[in-house]
Structures are given as C-alpha cells and as structure tokens.
Amino acid sequence: AQKITQTQPGMFVQEKEAVTLDCTYDTSDPSYGLFWYKQPSSGEMIFLIYQGSYDQQNATEGRYSLNFQKARKSANLVISASQLGDSAMYFCAMREGPPAGNNRKLIWGLGTSLAVNP
Amino acid sequence: DAGVTQSPTHLIKTRGQQVTLRCSPKSGHDTVSWYQQALGQGPQFIFQYYEEEERQRGNFPDRFSGHQFPNYSSELNVNALLLGDSALYLCASSANRGEAFFGQGTRLTVV
C-alpha cells in the first residue's frame, strides 16, 4: 500500500487565486512528520512547510498553509494568491517516527504538477 | 550561509563504470541523506549518514555505497553502473525537525 498518496497528477489555477493540493498518508506510528516540497523544472527540491503529528495548530509559512486533518490522515497544501512562479511539481513527504538524528528517511508521493495561468 | 552543495551537476558514464557523487551539507547540519529520483517519479531514499555511520537504508543493492566524513560531507558511490541508474541524485541535509534541505542534484546519465 502506498504510504503517501497524491491523487492529482496535474492541477491548473488562475493567477491570484488559491489552490489546494491533496495528500493522504498511511502510518501506524504515533510520531511522524509531514512535509511539502516544490520542485521547479531546474530540479532543485525546495522545502515549503512542515507539520508534526503532535502539533496542535496547522502550519503556515507565508502563502503556504497545511490543512492537517489527523483523523482523516490528510495533509493538504493550500497556496494562496497563486503566482506564475508557483508553477512546478509539488511533493508531499512523510517521516515515520520521531525526528531523531538517526531517523531522517522521507517517504514521498508521486507529486502534483501545478500550472498557474496568467 | 551556504546551502547544500553537490558536485558534479551533470555526469555521463558508461555501463559497468563506477561513479562518485559528492555533497556538502548546510552549515550546522550533521545528517546527510541521499535520494534517487527517476524521471516523473518522486524521490526514493537510498541511505542516510549520521555520525559517520550509515543509519538507515532504502531498498537499493549493495552497488550503492556511501561515506560520511568528519566534516559531515558525504559521498555516494555506485559500482557497475546500469542503464537504470540514470536519474537525478539528490543529497539532503537535515535540521532538528527532520526537514530536509536539498542540493541542486546531480543528473547522472548512463549510456
């Protein structure tokens, strides 16, 4: 079974509008972390936002927010006020277990390609 | 503050050859992880180094090996290259919460 599922291979959004990218995860570990990354065509993976399993509040970083629904095991990324530069691949990833120095493995989804239209 | 740096950025090798990729972590990070990303796929975890030891390993054959040096930099070695090893190889160093900061990657082409 897939541990990270991103069901939207491609998404389109108009510039200045908000968009939600879906991510569901599967783990039996009570301690875990969820991450979103952006990968432009240049290939570099850019960290966007992090949510810990014990965090009480949904994470926010500028125009990015994470809609964390623990019971549903979903961690959707919301991008507000989309910009042309947001066009890229977006990956959801998970770390199972606590963030110890010997536990850094991230499990990744297949990604969602986002295109922002002018 | 220098981020994660990888070298080389591009590499072309012949089947059967060996390759070494290098990574310097972000300042203050002591953990380095390596990922392989095939075209159109998400990254796949190869292994992670912490305190100069391999701590975790993904589902990759022994042809993939690595090393971490006292200054936390790391190498990824791949022996007996196959065509299927062609991919983007990403190095990441980690902060306390485990979020990985990535280098620009090395694009390896095996011909």
Image (cartoon, coloured by chain):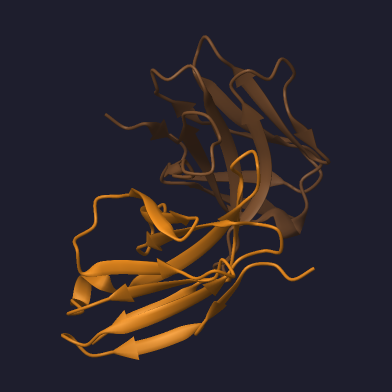
In the image, taking residue A49 as reference, residue A31 lies left or right, namely: left
In the image, residue A70 sits, relative to residue A77, either above or below, namely above
Q: Position of residue B46 (x, y in %)?
A: 35, 57
What is the quadrant of residue A52 in the picture?
top right
The chain displayed orange equals B
Q: Residue A92: in sight, yes or no?
A: yes
Q: Position of residue B66 (x, y in %)?
A: 36, 68
Residue furthest to the top in view is A71
Q: Residue A88: in sight, yes or no?
A: no
In the image, residue A23 sits, relative to residue B13, either above or below, namely above
**Residue at the spot 37% in from the left edge and 81% down from the top edge:** B20
In the image, residue B85 sits, relative to residue A115, either above or below, namely below
**Residue at the spot 48% in from the left edge and 65% down from the top edge:** B90
Q: Position of residue A32 (x, y in %)?
A: 52, 27
In the image, taking residue B80 as reference, residue B96 lies left or right, namely: right
The chain displayed brown equals A
* Total numbered labels: 0
Rendered-image quadrant of the C terminus of chain A: bottom right
In the image, taking residue A63 as reference, residue A30 lies left or right, namely: left
Q: Nearer the viewer, residue B98 or A86?
A: B98
What is the quadrant of residue B76 in the picture?
bottom left
Rendered-image quadrant of the N terminus of chain A: top left
**Residue at the spot 24% in from the left edge and 57% down from the top edge:** B60
Q: Nearer the viewer, residue A94 or A86?
A: A94
Q: Position of residue A85 (x, y in %)?
A: 73, 59
In the image, residue B24 sits, relative to residue A12, either above or below, namely below
Q: Nearer the viewer, residue B81 or B84?
A: B81
